[in-house]
Image (cartoon, rainbow, N blue to C red):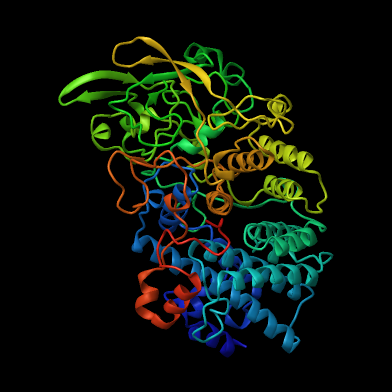
Amino acid sequence: MIKNIKKWTLAIGGVLALNACSDFEEINVNPVAANADQVQVEYFINNSITGAQQNPHVAERAFVLYWKAAGRMDRINSLPVGYYSDGWTNDYFNSISGWLNHAYTAVQIADEKIENGNVTEYTNNLKQVARIWRVYLLSELTDNFGPVAINGFQGENPDFNSVEEVYDFMLTELKEATADMDEGITAPSNVQQLDPAYGYNFETWKKYATSMRMRLAMRLSQVDEAKAQAEFEDAASGQFITTWEDSFKVAEKPGWDDLTGVMSREWNNQYLSPTLNNLMIGLGGISSEELLPADLHQHIKAEDYFGKKYEDHFTTLTNDPSAGYWFDGLHAEIDPRAYEAYVVPGWFDNPEMNRYPSWSPGTTGTTKRNLLDGEEVVEEIEAAFTWNAPSIGDWGEKGSKNQVYSWAGALPRLAHRFRNSSTERVFFGAWESYFLIAEAAVRGWNVPHDGQTAYEEGVKQSFDYWNTSSYVEDYLTSDDYNRVGTSVNWNHTAEPTDKSITYINGYNGNEETTTFSYPDNHLYKNGSVKNDHLTKIITQKFIAQTPWLPLETWNDHRRLGLPFFENPAVENSLPNLPALDQSNYTESRQEFFPQRLKYPGNLQNNVPEGYQQAVNHLGGDDSVLTPLWWAQPE
């Protein structure tokens, strides 16, 4: 068998293994010190799952600079302005090739053991686990790049498959692996220790496979609804993830290895994004007075107050509804999860205040910054106990005169427990199962819950995660709109209307009044609908997925155009987003948003035939702006 294993790992050609490990000793890191004669399936599964947690180098590039940016869980001028780095892409592509290498090898070893009769009671179940995990990795790969090779680890240069073929394969694998797994079998304790997700609880692995099948089936909703419905209904008739205990999650740990936190790089600021901010302001009708200690109440502003307007220092060339304003306090009402996930600037006695970078305490400790006119200070802004998330994009001259809009000490940033490798990275939370079922119900599919029940349970699961459950009943009955015109209450679908707001002219101090209009999201029903059931579902799903699943929020936006993503500012033109300019920045168009990652240069240079095959399947240029097969049709 060892000869064949070496053949598998050394002969892996093709695209996905360009720089993957090919040495047996390297890919078979044996946590219990077995020698080569004792190689086991579980070693490869363990290496694959552990590797996919992403060491800090890979995580910064893939999870933060790509996914969190594109999924609008951070404010980063990378993919959202059309920028990509071939170096970042190569690092990620090479890494996921290795993780897939381990997963494919686990299946192959299991097959050979079964063929030779060299099996334990649980060998077949391990094979099914490897198949399920392999599907997740393939979904991650194809959702980033598009066409990939299904058989990229079979000892020969593979053909590339279309995205449709990859999805057919993944859905079939999940169905078969679930059917072929015997959840009544228990793995020995030493084997359980080699599964960082579920400890080889096979019943829970089956639930994960079913939930994954629902996720992938729903991905087809805009391109092949009949198949999406059939696959989803079949999956939803089984057991899926319904509790936090069953959620797919892996514990992070401090240090610098594959299990170190994906958001642990100290120089990444991990800001509150304007997208998330606009979704949470006003949503749910819970007052900041209820959510914050009494000594912060003095900073809370009136409900109809919009802040200070500085049109010469804050960009207005974006459809961000908060553009042009600096909010000089705390909002009257906000989603209760906001203050749990992000910390108010200047609240230094909050134990969740993150002070990274640790070598520069002044970066987060300084809360006063200036607005300038040449060398002259127009105004000193005290950002302590304020709540802002300025737009991304090019701020031009306004940005050069503004020292506050990108200063770490002036803006809400992610809570410390998500930065210090002390929690668990979530790959599939129970809330997602319920939001998927809610969407299926809205589509009229046959699922185990009606839309409202599933929607509200998804919200409750998320509130449980954030320890805010005491607010959830009032929250679910709220008719209050957020900044983009969506409310929480399932039975409240009235569309928002323009409203009168007050603000202070930042240059002369006068209080003024204006009319606020909610932004139109032309990607969804041409901007005419802001508060229907599907918008509510995807709004809540986005908030619940924060901060762990930015790839999924990017996927939902590519698929549905939901929730509302504001355009990057265009005070100057954005060379990598040529369609967006000062004549159309109030519109929402598919070509204003990144659709995929460009293939790494290594692929084109080293495997030109495979690369061309991939591009042919893509159906467009190998560029960030080419939509994937399952994306929302133009």
Q: Answer whether residue 21 is visible to the viewer in this image.
A: no
Please name the residue shown 49% across and 11% down the image. 298
User: Against 111, is 372 above or below?
Assistant: above
11 to 213, vertically: above or below: below
| Residue that lies at the very extreme toward the left in this rendered image | 375
Task: Give the image location of residue 82, x and y in percent.
Answer: 37, 53
Q: Answer with left or right where residue 280 lies relative to residue 128.
A: left
From this view, report whether residue 375 is shown above or below residue 13: above
- In this rendering, does residue 4 appear at all? yes
Residue at the (74%, 27%) spot, across then down: 473
Q: Residue at x 76, y 63 (%)?
A: 230
Pinpoint residue 41: horizontal percent, then vertical percent.
65, 74
For the point 42% across and 77% down, the residue is 611
Figure quadrant of residue 106: bottom right
Residue 276 % position (x, y)? 52, 37
The spot of residue 259 in percent (x, y) is 52, 55
The N terminus lies in which quarter of the figure? bottom right
Looking at the picture, tell me which residue is in the foreground, 507 or 71: 507
Camera-nearest residue between 165 and 250: 165
* Depth order, front residue of 630/185: 630
Total numbered circles: 0
In the image shown, does 168 or 178 lie closer to the viewer?
168
Left or right, 332 with respect to 242, comes to: left
